[in-house]
Amino acid sequence: MTGNDYLLFSPAARKTVKLARLWLYNAVFALGVAGLFALPPVILRKTLAGVADARRIFDTALIIHVNMSELVWLVSICCLVFSLRSAEKLYFFSRGSAFLAIFGTLLMAISPLIAKSIPYTNDYIPILGNIWFMLGLACFTAGALLQSAICLCSFRFSWKFDDNFARSFAAYSTAVIILIAFLCFALSARELKSAALAAKDYYENLFWAGGHTLQFAYIQMMVFAWLWVGRVESKPWQTIFIYSFALAMVIAAPFIYLEYPVLSGEFPDFFTRQMQYGLGLAPLLAGILLLFSHRKSGVTGSEKNAIVFSLLLFIAGGIIGFMIQGSNAIIPAHYHGSIVAVTLSFMALVYDILPRLGFKKPLGKIAAWQPVVYGTGQLMHISGLAIMGGYGALRKAAGSSATIDTIIGKAMFFSGGGLAIIGGFLFVFIAVKTIVGKNA
């Protein structure tokens, strides 16, 4: 067995390329839907706060936006990478997992339009209380879990710890983290089955542990994108060491259920502290490698700009995190900074992967400026959100900025949000144009 057996982006078999394309299509579609549903939450923070059903519209749009931009988009990109490490003999099951996830995504996207819904704005995976959304979420989850498991079933160990093995270790470790996250969801559901809780409280407790754990999977893949797309030259043991951090942090998560009840004060505090102290270690080391290690040539303007703004937003999100006091808009400002950093790194990864899947490489000024527009808008958006939070603006509340006396904060929030939406649609436009265009 040679190191090339572990080459993540080696010339892939035709079936593998088809499979990866399915996950790419689902990811791009989800991001486009997320952009559409981002409009009401931005507008309803002030402009239409007095209209009838503003709160319900705000919550419903926010739920679809969060699930599409964080769960479906991010997990689909992870599964895209997993598909490139999946054995061809398991193609039938891999293909089924992708179609199941796509079906689930479509159901979630149209669910607010085909049934009356009760919105529950809990953290991580907010729930829209209608049967079609729940069915869609179940289908997408099943597809993602199956693809993660297939990736792990394709694992072949080698004592040759070269660059190819290090890249594959990033995929395998991320798949393990995703499976652990959903195991936490299952364990929480089992324990809460007999708890007498209101629906929102039930979902809040159900998704708390797994939601925190899932962030480590996103960060793991972000670190991979930084190092891979940035063409960082490093020792294989260095990157394996970095990828091991997130994996080591979450291995103990299922065992916490043996120590503390889900509804105890210690249980949520453990996962909060775990993320607070453990989530930044791998990005810190990866950022040092990215900034100070030698890099190979071949990074395009779009990829470079996406990585740069990903770094900036992750740093900004971390700084804002130290400002959190109470439950106000500073919390989503912190979280948006961190999660948008992941999104930008995934955009860079998509720009890099497109030609490897048989499409032309996105070049030109629009592609190069897209991460700048999106990243600048998000920096303005989270800065405005943090400023408004300092003046008392609540999180997840329609019209919460109407009485906040900070012109600068409001200007940065609304203009930045608009700019970020434009940047997001530019990415979808570039990706769709490349996909439907003539193959490379």
Image: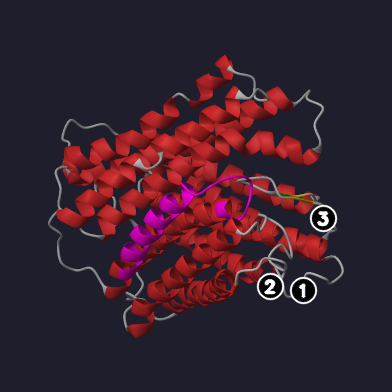
Question: Label 3 sits on what residue type?
Answer: Ser
Q: Residue 54's x, y, as percent?
A: 80, 66
Structural distance between the alpha carbons of marks 2 and 1: 7 Å
Q: Which one is nearer the viewer's eye here, 431 or 96?
A: 431
Sequence-wise first label, 2 or 1: 2
Residue farthest top in this picture: 259
Q: Is residue 179 left or right of residue 392?
A: left
Q: Which mark is residue 43?
A: 2
* In-front residue for pair 121/321: 321
- Residue visible at 54% across and 59% down in the picture: 386
Please identify the quarter of the rendering in which residue 261 is found.
top right
- Secondary element at tag 2: helix
Residue type, mark 1 in image: Leu
Q: Are marks 2 and 1 in contact (CB under 8 Å)?
A: yes
Tag 3 residue: 117
Q: Estimate the x, y position of residue 109 in percent, counting from the top left.
A: 68, 62
Residue 313 is covered by the magenta coloring? yes
| Residue designated by label 1 | 48
Which residues are drawn in magenta? 305-330
Quadrant of the image containing the C terminus: bottom left
Residue at image x 68%, y 48%?
126
In the visual, does 239 lie left or right of 410? Answer: left
